[in-house]
């Protein structure tokens, strides 16, 4: 075949003339174009009837479409075309869709005639107060034209992408043995096995497996190659069950004019550039924030999306996390907020609904490329099984979904009781109910490491500066051998010492908390863990090591909202006594509810948060040292799960 194609190249391609649709020959020829060979084959007459009626769209919003697929396959480019044989598929379905397009455009022509020459070819006219023949205003007619045009264009685009482009590949895929991965004109990936006589699962016709042409090769197949929707397309194609998801996503789908990528023409009378061909960049705010390229055929995702049946259930489950207030204090300074800095009249309901939907729709994609276990792209069953039973999954935007059934290796309720469906770039779980409590997902665990001064708001009545002192405990140097500090990461902690006789207060911001219930724990060390900060009872002798006094440190704590209101208080009666023999976690509150949401606040007030104040009173004056101190490593904030509530 290479020799035949080479000879065709030397002889030159058949020229494209105005009457090339009338050319008929008895036998397909290697010197004829793909389109001419289709015209010459009576067994492809249904295909011919479809392709010459469909315009080529480079993208859905393409306004410069001018050629049909008949014209495309007649050009001197290189294609491989898999042509469905008459009688092996329902060609009438596509022809009826084309008839529907013609009817819509006839309606457009009739409406445009009412507007006269004021309507351009796309039906766009400035709104005026005039009336049409049926009493409709010009602006109403223009709106009807735009809606009909959009519907007709979408129908034609879909026929082109899902039928024509689903059988065409650029470049020449020769009939070599073995399975090849083919990139189709619509961007889909499929397989072609010439030896087995299979294209995307459809058999090649026994007598017309390969027909060379001047601009490529044609293979005749017995049926239509199945079109596989990507995740984004699947939502649109099944909008009867995904209307809420799809309509929300498409509301944020924008095409922005790209001047540098457009072809310039000449200046108009106003001195404005008129572009011969305009290019646009497609962006979607929600998809951008999700970091999931669900329109990309080369990507692979596990998608968990609520159908309309589960949509309200999902909203009601997650809505309690987004209880915004109408104003917030911010501009945190010196252990308090500047009360003059507040945003009033915040539209809390709108902010709640926006962030609620954004949270759901930006965190429902998972990339197998970051799974701890590696899978081949075609191992869909393995990918699904791993996702359903993993201890936790991280979505593309970083949201962690924990599996409440991890201990028993059970299925994560996130996936509901539905089976997945395949897409061209992954799998989709169409949820019919939303069964995962959000405390296992959006309300993530937070570890506030006090080794980082960013995590300290301020220190009141501190002796050693606004942020305390950082110490590293080292065996044989400053580590007390009688204290177990094995749980302290790198042996590093922060030390806060009282200055004088006032109460020591350490303020710690609790950033990015949702409205909801949390458990709050603190990782503390006895001050004697560091021998340099110990209270000496007996100095070391030749016979006995140095001994230390118990400091009996008692910790109290208070939680404040951003406006200074007390959310919870752990006073003297409930004070925590820090044990002397080991570093430990101490639970301050098993369950405390934060009434406001502090996640995704509007720009300008994002430095707003609740405060955890840890305090310790000075030591009794009768003791050998009057100052007292706190040795803190971490604060841990954990969501309270439903089963934890008594």
Image (tube, rainbow, N blue to C red):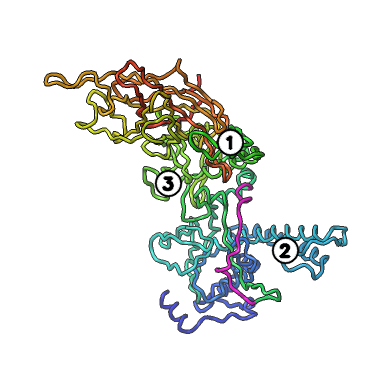
Q: Percent position (x, y) of residue 57?
A: 60, 65
Identify residue for label 3. 368
The residue sitting at 80% across, 64% down in the picture is 110
Q: Percent position (x, y) of residue 264?
A: 60, 74
Q: Element type at marker 1?
A: loop
Mark closer to the chain start, 3 or 2: 2
Numbered circle sitting on residue 102: 2
Identify residue for label 1. 339
Mark 1 or 3, closer to the camera: 1
Mark closer to the chain start, 1 or 3: 1
The residue sitting at 64% across, 59% down in the picture is 94
Mark 3 or 2, closer to the camera: 3
Marks 3/2: CA distance?
44 Å
Mark 1 or 2, closer to the camera: 1
367 drawn magenta: no
Q: Percent position (x, y) of residue 583?
A: 32, 26
The residue sitting at 56% across, 35% down in the picture is 597
- Foreground pick, 524 / 379: 524
User: Would you say residue 211 is visible in this rendering?
Assistant: no
């Amino acid at each position: 075949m290479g020799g035949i194609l080479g000879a065709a190249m030397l002889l030159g391609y058949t020229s494209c003339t105005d009457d090339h649709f009338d050319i008929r020959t008895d036998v397909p020829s290697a010197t004829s174009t793909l389109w001419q060979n289709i015209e010459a084959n009576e067994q492809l007459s249904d295909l011919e009837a479809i392709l010459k009626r469909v315009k080529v769209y480079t993208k859905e919003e393409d306004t410069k479409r001018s050629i049909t697929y008949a014209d495309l396959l007649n050009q001197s480019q290189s294609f491989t075309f898999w042509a469905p044989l008459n009688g092996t598929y329902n060609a009438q379905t596509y022809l009826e869709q084309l008839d529907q397009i013609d009817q819509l455009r006839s309606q457009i022509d009739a409406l445009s005639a009412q507007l006269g020459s004021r309507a351009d070819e796309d039906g766009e006219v400035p709104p005026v107060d005039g009336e049409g023949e049926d009493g409709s205003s010009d602006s109403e007619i223009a709106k009807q034209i735009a809606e009909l045009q959009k519907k007709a264009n979408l129908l034609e685009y879909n026929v082109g992408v899902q039928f024509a482009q689903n059988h065409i590949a650029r470049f020449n895929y020769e009939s070599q043995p073995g399975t090849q991965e083919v990139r189709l004109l619509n961007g889909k990936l499929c397989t072609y096995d010439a030896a087995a006589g299979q294209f995307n699962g459809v058999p090649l016709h026994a007598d017309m497996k390969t027909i060379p042409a001047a601009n490529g090769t044609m293979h005749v197949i017995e049926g239509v190659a199945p079109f596989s929707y990507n995740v984004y397309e699947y939502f649109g194609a099944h909008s009867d069950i995904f209307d809420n998801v799809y309509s929300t996503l498409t509301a944020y789908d924008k095409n922005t004019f790209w001047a540098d990528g457009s072809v310039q023409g000449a200046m108009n009378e106003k001195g404005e550039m008129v572009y011969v061909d305009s290019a646009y960049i497609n962006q979607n705010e929600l998809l951008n924030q999700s970091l999931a390229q669900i329109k990309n055929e080369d990507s692979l995702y596990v998608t968990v999306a609520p159908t309309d049946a589960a949509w309200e259930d999902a909203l009601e489950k997650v809505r309690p996390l987004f209880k915004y207030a109408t104003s917030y204090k911010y501009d945190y300074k010196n252990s308090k907020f500047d009360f003059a800095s507040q945003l009033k009249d915040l539209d809390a309901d709108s902010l709640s609904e926006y962030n609620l939907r954004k949270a759901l729709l930006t965190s429902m994609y998972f990339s197998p490329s970051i799974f701890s276990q590696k899978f081949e792209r075609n191992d869909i069953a393995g990918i699904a099984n791993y996702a359903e039973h993993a201890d936790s999954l991280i979505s593309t935007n970083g949201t962690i979904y924990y599996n409440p059934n991890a201990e028993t290796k059970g299925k994560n309720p996130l996936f509901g009781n539905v089976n997945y469906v395949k897409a061209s770039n992954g799998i989709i779980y169409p949820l019919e109910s939303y069964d995962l409590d959000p405390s296992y997902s959006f309300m993530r665990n937070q570890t506030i490491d006090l080794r980082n001064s960013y995590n300290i708001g301020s220190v009141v009545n501190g002796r050693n500066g606004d942020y305390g002192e950082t110490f590293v405990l080292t065996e044989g140097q400053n580590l007390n051998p009688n204290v177990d500090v094995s749980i302290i990461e790198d042996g590093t902690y922060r030390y806060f010492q009282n200055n004088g006789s006032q109460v020591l207060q350490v303020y710690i911001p609790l950033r990015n908390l949702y409205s909801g219930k949390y458990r709050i724990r603190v990782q503390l060390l006895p001050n004697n863990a560091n021998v340099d900060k110990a209270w000496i009872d007996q100095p070391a002798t030749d016979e006995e090591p140095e001994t230390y006094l118990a400091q009996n440190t008692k910790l109290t704590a208070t939680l404040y909202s951003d406006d200074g209101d007390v959310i919870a208080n752990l006073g003297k009666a409930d004070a925590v006594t820090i044990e002397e023999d080991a570093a430990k976690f101490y639970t301050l509150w098993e369950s405390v509810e934060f009434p406001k949401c502090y996640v995704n606040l509007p720009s300008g007030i994002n430095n707003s948060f609740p405060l955890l104040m840890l305090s310790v009173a000075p030591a009794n004056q009768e003791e050998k040292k009057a100052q007292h101190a706190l040795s803190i490593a971490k604060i841990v904030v954990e969501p309270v799960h439903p089963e934890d509530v008594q």
